[in-house]
Amino acid sequence: MSSVPSEGAQAYVGQRCVAWRFGAQPWQWQQADGLEAAVAAVAAALKADPAVRKPRVALWLAGALARPFIVPPVPGLRSWTEARRLAAALAPDETGLAGPCEVWLDAAPPGQAVLGVAIETAARETIERVLAAQGVRATAMQPWWTAAIARALDERAALSRIVVAEPESLVVLAGRDAVFSAAATCAPLPSPERAAAWLQRTVLSLGLAEGDGLRVALSSGAGLTDAVMEPWA
Amino acid sequence: MKRIEVDFVRRPPPGRGWWGVTVLLLVAAVALAAWGWTLRADAAGVRAQMQEWHARADALVHQASRRGTLAAQPPPVYAADAHAALRLQRVPIDAALASLESVATVGVLPVSVDISSADATVRVQVEFSTYEALLKYLEDLNAGEPSERWILATAQGTAQGASGRPIALIVSRWRKLD
């Protein structure tokens, strides 16, 4: 058997479920009891594959792990570092994440609201620690809903609002042109009735009833590229 | 709405190999800079030498032009005498006199020698007793010469010298000896 690198290995990591695919194989889904167990399952599967020579994996983070939020404009900020520190301080309250967060900030003109994406520092360190223990290296660590937005924009360039439904979260984003105006995350995912109520409340409170909308739904057992897209009325 | 490029992965710090390559590149850059500096210094030296050569060439050209200017000036008053002296110096007087002294013919007596530097000729006036002796004297003078250097210009039996003998004029040209 010829040994090959694992550049094509991908994994979707959440708190309660995990999925992976090595090369052209179909996606493998598995229930998990927490983030550490989910990452360990991916690493073990990668190490168990005899065709993998250099275990590397690109991670897609579930919406419950990496959550978007809007950082309001704050006068008096003098540097990008200050803006990131402010966003990191706002992230737990704005996203519902617990504990210290690391934040990615979108580029935006001064004086405008900017999109931020937060991940708990502890969650990121857990992922890195478990992978390192197994000798696996992460080549990427991106929220899966960003891939869903990119695919939706390929379908509809004039898209102004989107809801991304994942197995354990709902992510809502709205904006026009290149500026995001609203972001919200519902995680963990409640019952379908409660999730629908949360979505309706969010639409009303954030004023997202108007505009070209799309709903992207990822279900357990399906491939990440097989997410269902349908208009969001 | 737009695409979002978020990536929380932490890139691993560069390893020893990376640092080694970086140090090598830095050393190479420093070496290149030093080499470039040396080349610059060499080029400056060559440039200075070329400038010096140009200056010398200009000076030579200037000097040559001055010489041309001097040549165009009217000759000095002593030029004619100098040229005459030069021409006289170029006439082999010693050879002509040695030629005359080496020949002694009975019946022929040289009475005057006139050396002309203008046309490099030597005129010898002789008194002779007979034409036969005169011809014998000419043959002795021209003996061994590739061509007849000495020629008889005039021989006048009526024009007598101080001794009452006829006078002849013998001419030789010495230009070819130059």
Image (cartoon, coloured by chain):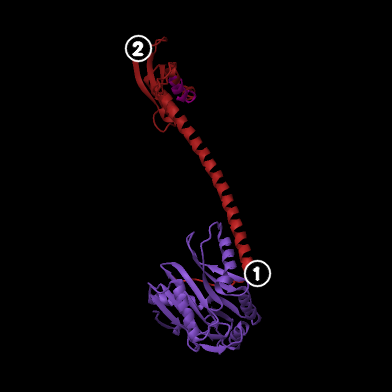
Chain colours: A purple, B red
Residue interval drawn in magenta: B83-95
Let me know if marks 1 and 2 both belong to one chain: yes
Q: Is residue B1 visible?
A: no
A53 to B164, vertically: above or below: below
> Label 2: which residue?
B159
Location of residue A190 in the rendering, given as x and y in whole percent from the top left corner: 53, 84
Quadrant for the C terminus of chain A, please.
bottom left
Report the disc number at residue B34. none
Seen from the viewer's position, the closer of residues B174 and A146 is A146
Query: Which chain does the numbered disc 2 sit on?
Result: B
Dominant SS of magenta comes to helix
Q: Which mark is residue B16?
A: 1
Q: Residues within 10 Å of mark 1 (few under 14, many from 20)?
A: few
Where is the N terminus of chain A found, in terms of image quarters? Answer: bottom right
Disc on the earlier residue, 1 or 2: 1
Crowd tier of the residue under label 2, counting other residues whose Cα lies within 10 Å: few below 14, some 14–19, many 20 or above: few
Residue type, mark 1 in image: Arg
Q: Is residue B89 magenta?
A: yes
> Residue at left 47%, top 60%?
A109
